[in-house]
Amino acid sequence: MVGIKTADELNKKFLREGMWPTIFCNGCGHGVVLEYTFWALEELGLDMDKVIFSSGIGCSSRLPGYINADGLHTTHGRAIAFATGIKAADPDFHVIVFTGDGDCAGIGGNHFIHAARRNIDMTVIMINNFIYGMTGGQLAPTAPLGSIATTAPYGNIEHPFDICNLACALGANYVARWGVSHPYQPIKSIKEGIQKKGFSLLEFLAPCPTAYGRRNKLGDIKKHWAWYDNNTILKEDLEKIMKYGTEQEKEQVKEKIPLGVFQDIQKPGFFEAYEKLVDRLKEKESKPKGAKK
Amino acid sequence: MIEVREDWCKGCNICIDRCPVDALEESDILNRRGIRPPKLKEKNDCNFCRLCELICPDLAITVFPDEKEKKPVKKTLLTPVGGKTK
Ligand SMILES: Cc1ncc(C[n+]2csc(CCOP(=O)(O)OP(=O)(O)O)c2C)c(N)n1
Ligand code: SF4
Ligand code: SF4
Ligand code: SF4
Ligand SMILES: [Mg+2]
């Protein structure tokens, strides 16, 4: 770790203190993701003048407003499109997108798909709370079957989006999913995601006690947070149990949400490929016309 | 030592619930939201693992490791990701 050792020093460096405390409800998981991102940035020792944030609309999309760095708070679902623009204007920037499940997988779904497919160099931190939190709890495309929402009062009958699976299929360079209650793996993973050239997706499963937990009778904040521990499993453990476990063990873990790093590859990112293209054309241009190779 | 920014705490009590050695409790102070921020218990086994600091959603806690007082590091109840909690 570099200079900073305590949370107090960390806050002084990264937090726009005038904006604190957050607008988030008591027990909301969004603040934790922000803190993990701070630690990751600190451990990487990046120049914060070279890091820029982008977000759409939603509770999760408020996060850049709390960071002592440049950021764009854009329109609903368009954070990734704006981030692409930043990167195109100056590829030296590290672009980090904070987005929600509604923002990224719902209204912004197509931006997400194409940014991942084009492998555009950015780090997307999608906070999945299974719901449209800010607008009072409409059904999100990530909500598990049976979830209760204002627009699904009798339970969700739509199959949820597995956004990590989608990103893997699109060939994103780095794809991981984590919860908020265990700090170390996510911090390391955010670091890896930011360092990675090309598209990285980090999905965080975060509790939303107000719009999701309450409506789905997940209990008080403590019980709601525990739901995430009891309903997730490390990807490696899941694979082992599915291979060597007894039928009963398999039955127990079948419905759990896997956590971990799902993809970590090194395809050239869009801007690397673009740079090469420009170089190739320049070289061609500089050769006298009609000259033989 | 543990420092709590009292006016930042929203009282979710996640820190108290998740402390691996059950070292925290609600204090007697009421902050301006009318909630009681956490404090270390009179007698506690805090080993400065910093979990409470890292998972506080409102960044209200700072843990300062006590250099002088070397406590034996107890086996913590930290569960790996996906482990069962109560
Ligand atoms: C074009 C447009 N449509 C709808 C809205 C209303 N709206 C604001 S936030 C939001 C949902 C946000 O959900 P999510 O991204 O999951 O964020 P959360 O609040 O759950 O963190 C919606 C539908 C809007 N602001 N703009
Ligand atoms: S509505 Fe949900 S997501 Fe929004 S701040 Fe409250 S708990 Fe967090
Ligand atoms: S985790 Fe933070 S906000 Fe929650 S009770 Fe503890 S100090 Fe307060
Ligand atoms: S530092 Fe660790 S042991 Fe000490 S109060 Fe916080 S969570 Fe408990
Ligand atoms: Mg949401």
Image: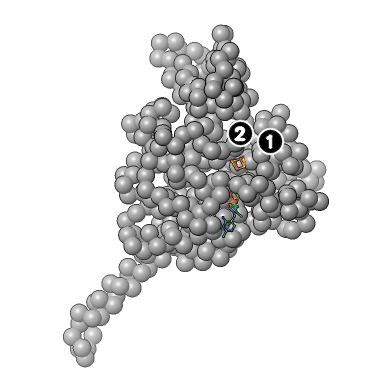
Mark positioned earlier in the residue sequence (1 or 2): 2
- In this rendering, position of residue A152 left or right of residue A263: right
Give whichever of A141, B20 is nearer the camera.
A141
Dot 2: few (<14), some (14–19), or many (≥20) neighbours within 10 Å? many
Secondary structure of the residue carrying tag 2 is loop
Q: Quadrant of the C terminus of chain A?
A: bottom left
Give whichever of B55, A263 is nearer the camera.
B55
Tell me which amino acid carries mark 1: His
Image location (x, y in percent) of residue A61: 51, 48
Read off the residue under disc 2.
Answer: A27
- In this rendering, position of residue A219 left or right of residue B38: right
Secondary structure of the residue carrying tag 1 is helix
Image location (x, y in percent) of residue A153: 78, 50
Q: Quadrant of residue A102 in the image?
A: bottom right
- In this rendering, position of residue A214 left or right of residue B4: right
Q: Quadrant of the N terminus of chain A?
A: top left
Task: Determine which of the numbered discs, if any, sits on residue A224 in the image.
Answer: 1
From the Cβ of disc 2, is ligand 2 less than 8 Å away?
yes
- What residue is shown at x 23% (from left), y 81% (from top)? A285
Q: Which chain is indicated by disc 2? A: A
Q: Nearer the viewer, mark 1 or mark 2?
A: 2
Image location (x, y in percent) of residue B71: 49, 13
Q: Which chain is indicated by disc 1? A: A
- What residue is shown at x 48% (from left), y 52% (from top)? A55
Q: Quadrant of residue A113 in the image?
A: bottom right
- Please check whether the numbered discs 1 and 2 fall on a single chain: yes
Task: Determine which of the numbered discs, if any, sits on residue A80 in the image.
Answer: none
